[in-house]
Every structure is written in structure tokens, then in C-alpha cells.
Image (spheres, rainbow, N blue to C red):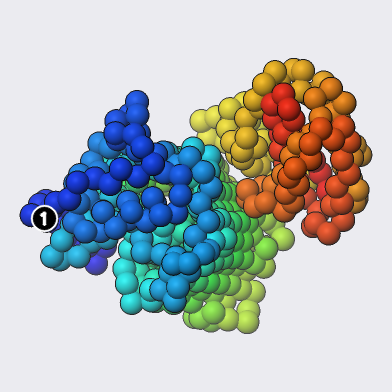
Amino acid sequence: MKKIRFLVTLALLGLSVSANAQTHPALGGGDGSEATPYLIYEPEQLADLATFVNAGNGETTEGKYYKLMNDIDLGVAPYNTDEGWQPIGNLDFEDASIFQGNFDGNNKVVKNLKINRPEQRYIGLFGFMSGGSIKNLGVENCNITGLRSVGGLAGWSETGSITGCHATGTVSGTVDVGGLVGSNMSPITNCYATVNVTGTGTDSAGGLAGYHHDSNITNCYATGNVTGTQAAGGLLGHLESSSIISYCYATGNVTGIDRVGGLVGFNNSSTVTNCIAANSSVIATDESSTAINRVIGNTNAGTLQNLYANSAATVKKGNGNVSQTNALNGMAGEGKEMAAFKSQDFYTTAANWNGGAWDFGKVWSISEGETFPWLKWQNMDETTGNAETLSAATKIFPNPTRGELTITNYESGITNVEIYDMTGRVFNHSQGLIFNAQLKIDLSHLPSGVYFLKIETERGAITHKVVKK
């Protein structure tokens, strides 16, 4: 089934665009070159791109570049109607309207994305993309329902690349449902999903991707709960041949009927190496299931290397517990206490891994003893102005805090403060603070965890990490 679908897709990609090809919309400026990309400032401009591509002009986007200049809120009319957003790019048997461009999210987010199209395939912010790239883009607080190939960022991604992207919210569909991508054949690097995923059909539900084939996934994680049927996994539901999954982890609870794993539901002839399943529970509802494990539900050939799991995870089929035997290079993985997964030493000790430790120089960060690793780019905002001067002048205390937090900058004053969690979600936004030398913020209503403060002053901006106890 998967192979047939893949061949059909390749054939369809050979179709020509509509004879009524249109002139590319101006959007917010630019000419689509790499040096001067098309710019997108407003929801209307993003919608214009979708309308243009979906009208049969997908080939026009090949080799073109796009850049998002502002956060985009799609939770307003006309994008929050019953059906919600129309995805960018689709695929049917009369017309190939596939997005083939290179989209730079510019560390901005598309928020409050609603899609309610339970009878349609290829559902996400991007419906169907091929040959291009998406980078540095967030999709936050999404609420998405589709038929098959359903994801927060993209429904189907093929022969392109996805880098530095994330999604938060809920995604549901029947087949090939994922937090970031539904059906994926593109390399995914330095991405994460905090999405609760529900797959109600026969195959493939995963916290990051539902179905993944023929490319690598590196330095990624998923934290949402996953509910599926056949092939349900905390990171990936169905993993097909010739892929390599490395330096990834999943933490969400996973429930399915059969072929259920904390990291991957079903692995067919791929390599899974240097990964962690830190789930609290992995459950197969079919009491006759023989394909349930705390890391990989079931493997047909393939290579498993240096895999770890939560030693206290509940693993069940029906109402009965499933015993797990430690196997560093097996489907159950080597059991570790959760505290190990919140310690940088565990990740940087080369002996724990095959071919090299996790990269805490350029890729990962951690709050020792408090959190799982997060991606360094999640600090989200680079310092502007003189970093050394801003750091010296800006004080935050107490840190860690149980409630009130005091921020001071007596040299340049505080004009704005935003508080993000590790998913990029904004919890506090204080504007119009004209030259306030001191500001107090109450964090008592927030759950315990790590947060990032973007502090804007008259001389620039800087991001600080704070811990709420």
C-alpha cells in the first residue's frame, strides 16, 4: 500500500500545471529570489499564497524563496470559519498544485491555526510540499482535523527538508497523522512537536510524524500524547525502509491497538540509534497484541542501537502488564530512571552512545535536574545591541523563583517583556513600559518548569532563562 502510494505520487509529480497559470501575487514585496525573497507580513498575504498554489500554480513556486516577517494569527475571520484554513498545496488526480518553494519562517509563528476538513487529504498549514524547504517556522495552538496525511506543519512533505520548526496543539485524522508532519519523506532536523495526536484509522500515528520513509530524522523530540490504532509511537507511527532516526526522544503517553511503542510503533528495515523513550505509559488495547514495547513496538529487520527507556514506564496489553527485559540494542531498550534523562552528563558521556555523544555545544541545552533537553534555538530571540552591556545591566531575581520575579535595568530601561515556555508559547506580555528601571512579574500561576524571558530595552533586547519552582 505504501509503495503503491509512493509510486503514484511520483507519477503525479510529472503532470504539468494548469494552462491558466497566473502571475505570482506580489505578497508583501520581494521578487522570490534567494537574495530578495517574497515577504509575508499579514494573514491575507499568506492566504494569497495558498490561493495561488492551489489554483494549479505549484510549479511556479519551484526555486522561489519566501520569508515570514511577522507572527501571523489565523484565529480571526475569515480563517476561523467552520472549515478553517485552506492548506497551502494539494494533490488530486486532475491537477498538481504542490508547493515547491523555500519558506523561511524567520523564527516567527503562525498561531491559532484551525482546520476542520475531515473528508480531505493532505491537511496542515502546508497541505502538500515537494522539493523545497521549510525552516525556522512555528505553528502554535493548532486545532486540526483531516482525513489522511494530517500534520500541524504539513500534511505531506516529499523530497524537501524541514529544519528548526515546531508545532503545538492538537491534530487528528484517520491514517498517517503526526504532530509536525502527517506523511513524510523529507529530512527533519532540529525540530519538535508538543501536539496531542489522534489517529482513528488503520495505520500510523506519531508525535512528530505519522508515516516516515526514506530520509533521516536527527535531533528532534515530541512530547504530546498519541492515540492510534495500528502503528502508534511517541515520535513516529510507521517507519519505513532506508531511514535513520538518531538523537531523538519522546515523552508522551502512547495508546494503540497493536504495534505500539514509546518511540516508534512499527519499524520496517530502518535504523534507530541513540534515542530515548521517556514515556510514562505505553498501552496496546488489544490483549492479544504481540507487538508492544517501551521503545519500538515491532521491528521487521532494521538496526536498533543504544536505545534507552523509562524503567518505570507502564507497559500493558489489555489489562495485563507486559514485562520488559533490558536490551540496549533491542525493542525494549535499556531501562533508566527518569533522573538520568534530565542530566547533561548522561547525554555527553560518549560510552552511552553509538558513534558519539549528543551535541550540547551547538544543538542541545538542558536545565540540570529540571528538564529534558531542548534545542538551543528555542531561546527564540537573539540578543540585539551590545550583548555584554545588556547582560551586565539586566538583573533578574530570585532565579529560581516560586512566584514574584523582579527585573531591573537602570541604564537603558525596560520597554517590553515576554515570557515563553519551552514550546514557544507566550504566557506573559507586558508592553508600553516606557523607561521602567524595575519591573515585577508574578509567575505564581505558572506550572513549574523552565521559561525564557525576552527583555526589550531602549538599547536592544536580550533573552534570559528562568526556572519556576
The residue drawn where x is 23% and y is 41% is 62
Location of mark 1 (residue): 20
Relative image position of residue 66 (x, y in whole percent): 36, 39
- Secondary structure at numbered mark 1: loop
The residue drawn where x is 65% and y is 25% is 384
Task: Please determine whether, in this image, residue 318 is positioned above or below residue 276.
Answer: below
The answer to whether any part of residue 453 appears in the image is no
Please identify the residue farthest to the left as the structure is shown: 19
Write down the quadrant of residue 306 in the picture: top right
The residue drawn where x is 19% and y is 46% is 23
Relative image position of residue 361 (x, y in whole percent): 62, 26
Left or right for 44, reference 430: left
The residue drawn where x is 32% and y is 51% is 49
The answer to whether any part of residue 118 appears in the image is yes
Left or right for 163, reference 15: right
Number of marks present in the image shown: 1
Write down the quadrant of residue 32 in the picture: top left
In front of the other: 277 or 66: 66
Task: Please determine whether, in this image, residue 204 is positioned above or below residue 301.
Answer: below
Left or right for 197, reference 173: right
In front of the other: 293 or 128: 128
The crowding category of the residue bearing disc 1, from other C-alpha atoms within 10 Å (few below 14, some 14 to 19, many at least 20), is few
Where's the N terminus, which quadrant?
A: bottom left
- The amino acid type, in three-letter code, at marker 1 is Asn
Relative image position of residue 81 (x, y in whole percent): 45, 73
Relative image position of residue 419 (x, y in whole percent): 73, 46
In front of the other: 233 or 335: 233
Task: Please determine whether, in this image, residue 22 is positioned above or below residue 114.
Answer: above
